[in-house]
Each structure stands twice: as structure tokens, then as C-alpha cells.
Amino acid sequence: MHVIATAGHVDHGKSTLVRALTGMEPDRWAEERRRGMTIDLGFAWTTLPGGHTVAFVDVPGHERFVSTMLAGVGPVPAVMFVVAADEGWMPQSAEHLDALAALGARHGLLVISRSDLMDPELALEEAQEQLATSTLGGLPAVCVSGTTGQGMDELRAALAKLVATLPPADSSADVRLWIDRAFTIRGAGTVVTGTLAAGSISVGDELTLLPDEQRVAVRGLQSLGTPRQRVDAVARVAVNLRGVAVASIQRGDVLVTRGHWLATSVLDARLHGGTRELEPPDQLPSQLRLHIGAASVTARLRPLGSDTARLTLERPLPLRIGDRALLRDPGRRRITAGLTVLDVAPPPLRRRGAAAARAAELVGMDGRPDAAAELARRGMVRADVLAAMGVDPTTAQPSALAAAGWLLDAARASELAARLTQAISSHDAHDPLDPGIPIASAMHTLGLPVAALVEAVVEAVVEANPLADLELSGGRVRKVTRLVGVDALPATLRTSLARVRQDLLANPFAAPEAARLTELGLGPKQLAALVRAGELDRLADGVYVLPGVESAALAVLAALPGPEFTLSAARQALGTSRRVAVPLLERLAQRGYTSRTAQGNHCLRGKNTAQGNHCLRGKN
């Protein structure tokens, strides 16, 4: 299906042409038919030569209903612009053209109606001159009479040629259905209609109704009066919703794919003229009406540059980078400017000079989604948020680090790596015995939301430079040291180690008392560092011996007479105290070198106990 909107001055025969083309009555209200004037959106459809189905959105031409007209043409990809031969170009012809030009409309057909009342050549020439100043310049033209049927075959052929050239819709895109009607049907409930410009909707889908962010389910679908299980864009569609009352829906509300859109009330945009030269933003009213799709909201305008501005909306709308919209001044009853959305999540302008800096940044933005550029500006962003802005996050590579759903700009990652290295150096200078910082501390230091990004930064640095100074170890980020063993320890700690080693070499099982450790300058941090370095072995709290003490103890215990020995006998043989003997024997038992007898004594595995139990290990 293809969808075409009408446009043109009031009473120039738009509805008459739609009736003649479709055989259907587009004016839904009795008052419209009584007054002979469309006051709301009308809909009708037909099949064109060649088999194309086309639906028409018939819009009102009177100046009092411009907002309704904009709701009709906003989501529609093509227009049938109607000018009456007997009246020619009129004020609402100009405003409708301004609106279409501001929205960037390029596809359409110029129709000179009522050609039976006057020679259409003058009106045709005048209309073409006006269209030439806009994006619709050069439209093909047809002269017709809806009353006599003159030129109707040519009109159908021209429409068929037009729809054949329209760009194909993306049926896999995210749904954004601007609602132009909401009503109830007995036995069905709430029904909304709109023009589905992209994506597809199926019965059973769950969508989000904005601006209230209400979760709704698709109970049923119709398109062109026929029930459907699925409707693909482009199409006029009626959606029967479950879970929402019609009283809570108004024209301009939106049905969107759940979780795929960013509803924003603040945006930065580039302004451009329609058929007239753009007024400088600082000369525009501070309050205007923004029209996009079927929505119309009050917008507060803050000028930034010569053609850029920040808009603050009265309610959030699901917008994406590159969207086209227009601004209208209701007081002067005229289109003020068209706009292209540049940023739907712009930075706040709180500091002095922030607005000027932002204006300079906007100069380089053209409204075309660019993942690498967006990431460079933001430094870091969630991939799903980038997608919700209308940017394909996969195109950010290779200039991005990806981790846990986040993207980090590579240049920003290099800056963070330098900051991280500096933070670790500062920490190590104050606390050399506990080198590096926990990943959680690194997250806080760098302002990163997840630990995975810290890891990604370090891994990227190491991948780029195998001799880099950062490494991940034991949940910490450390500076790599090229020294090993004792040489990696501070000089003062090496001195203390030499003295305690001297004591233990003289008596391996006489672990230094707390006073001796203090005398040697070995506090908890120093001792922990020596244990990590493999220079001391911790048997228990405050009990430190040299590595290899187990083998030495087994050699002494194996020399004891009898298969069993008591704690006291072991303590005397080792020449130590219970403070050392108890944890040492527990260590031997844990590692399978000894076992306990029924009397609670100890036995080296491999010896027979008094009860005949056979130990698995012992002397050869």
C-alpha cells in the first residue's frame, strides 16, 4: 500500500477528487458534508492502474484547521497538491506549501482542479512558479475536473507512476505510529488510527503508548477496512488496543516499539526556511508550536547559532536524529521554520559560555546519524540509548570499546587510561605495600558506570602496547613491575626481611613474637606484602615462618620414637611454643601429612598406630 495526503486551499476540490478517484466519501462528519468543507481528516482508498493500492489522507484547507492539516501530512510520504483553475494560488495554498517545504517533502503531484470552469493554464503556470521556490519544485502536473471526469484517467496514471517511484519502507524498523484518531467500537473497545510509515504491527504485539508510557497490547488490526494479522509499512492502519481507555488518548499520542525509543522534551535542531528565507532565530518568538507526525506541542525556543536553537517541549516526544518537523507561530498564523533534529539528548547549558560552545559544536552536525561522531561527542553511552536516538551502534567500531552494553570512545579510553595510571601511582606512593587499586575504586575515579569498562580500558591499553604499565590482577588494577621477588619490595622492607630471615634460619619454628615483629618494622601491611611476595608463610594470625617449614617439620617429627606423638612431644622436638606448634600441626593434617588417632594423638601417615591403623605416609 501507498499513502498520499492532499494539500491545498479550502474548497479547491480536494475531497471531490478523492471521491472521484475512490468512489468513497472521505468526509466522515455530517457537518462536513452539509458545509461542503473538510474540517477533520478524511480517509479513502483505491487500486490504481498497475495494481498499486493507494490510500488518501484528505486534509482540511481552511486556515482554522491548519493543525489538523499538519497532523494529516506529517507522517505521509507523498502529497497531491490541489489548486483550483478558477481561483488559482490562494493564501492556504501558500501556507500548505510552506508546511510541506519545511517538512522537506519531495514526492508529490500537482493537480489543477475544476478545469471545466476555466482554462487551467494560468493556474498551472502560477502554481508551478510557487512550487519552484520549494522542495516540491518540478512536480508533474495534471489538469482535471472531478465533476465532469475530464483528465481523471491521466490523474490515475500519474498517481500510479508517482507511487511506483516512492522509496520503499523499512518493515523491520521500530514502530512509531502517530495517532490521528481514537474512538471506541462496541464489542471491541479502544481503536486508534494512523499512518504506519515504517515497521510492522502484528496482533498480539505489546507496544508503549506515549506520552504516558502505558503498556498496551494489540488486540486486533484493520487496514483499508479488512481485518489483518499483520500490517507492514507504508499503510493506513486501525489498531484495536487492550489495556487503555479511549478517554486517555488524544491526537498526537504515539504507539512505539517497547524500549526502542527515547522520549525527549529537550532537543537541539537546525532551523531552515520553507519557501521564505529563514528569520534569524533570535528574532523568532520564544514560544511556538512544534508539529511532527500528528503531534502538536508548545515549544520554548532558545537561539544558539545563526540557524540553530534549543527547543524545550511541553511534553516529551519520541524523536530521533534526522527527524524533520516544523515550527508555527499561532499568533501570526504562519509557518515560522522547518527544522532538522540534531540531538535528542543534548548537554545542559549551565555554565557561562556553554551556549556559545554548543552553537559551535552544532555547526558540524547535519542531522545524519553518525555513531562514531556521537560517541566522540559523548565519550560514553549505552548502545541501546544510541540506537534509541536513531543511530546504529554497530557502526561505532572500531573507534569504540564495548563492554556490558556500553560503548566508550577510544580517544576517551586513552585519556582514562592515563588518569588511571596517575591514580595508581599516587596510591602506590602513599601505600607501596598494597600496590594498585580495586576495580571499584577505579570505577569511581574514572566516573565509569560498570566494572567491565575498567577492564576494557586496561585490556585495550595492553593490547595496543604489550609493554604497557597496567594489568588486572586479583580484582585490582596495578602498575606492572619489571622486578620480581625480593627486588620488587621497597628497600626498607628488604632490610626487615633480611633480619627476620636471619632469626628464622637460626630456629625455623620459632616464629617471631609480636614485639619482635614491631621492632623489625613489620606491621600487618608489611607482613602481607612479604606473604604475597612468597618470602614468608603465614600459619595463623601473628604466626609467620619461612616458606618450606612443612618439610622441615616432617623431618623432625619422623625422627620421634613410636608411631604416635602428642602435641607436647611435637612442640619439644620442634623447639617451639604451642602458639606455633598448634597451627603447624593443623597445616600438616589439612595437607594429608598427619592424621589423628582415637586417643587424640598425632600420627605420621605411613606408620602403624597402637590400634593397628595404618598411616599412608611416613619414613621410607
Image (tube, rainbow, N blue to C red):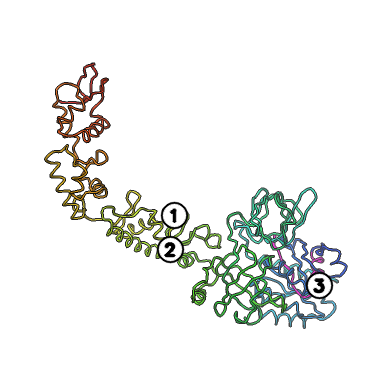
Q: Quadrant of the N terminus?
A: bottom right
Provide the secondary structure element on which disc 3 rests.
loop
Q: Specify the amino acid type for callout 2.
A: Asp
Between 440 and 58, which is closer to the camera in this rendering?
Answer: 440
| Residue identifier under label 1 | 450
**Residue 61: percent from left, percent from top:** 77, 73
Provide the secondary structure element on which disc 1 rests.
loop
Q: Specify the amino acid type for callout 1.
A: Val
* Residue at x-position 56% and y-position 71%: 268
Q: Quadrant of the C terminus?
A: top left
| Residue identifier under label 3 | 13
| Residue identifier under label 2 | 409
Give the Cα distance between marks 2 and 3.
Answer: 56 Å
**Residue 269: percent from left, percent from top:** 58, 72
Give the Cα distance between marks 3 and 1.
Answer: 62 Å
Q: Is 315 contained in the magenta span? A: no
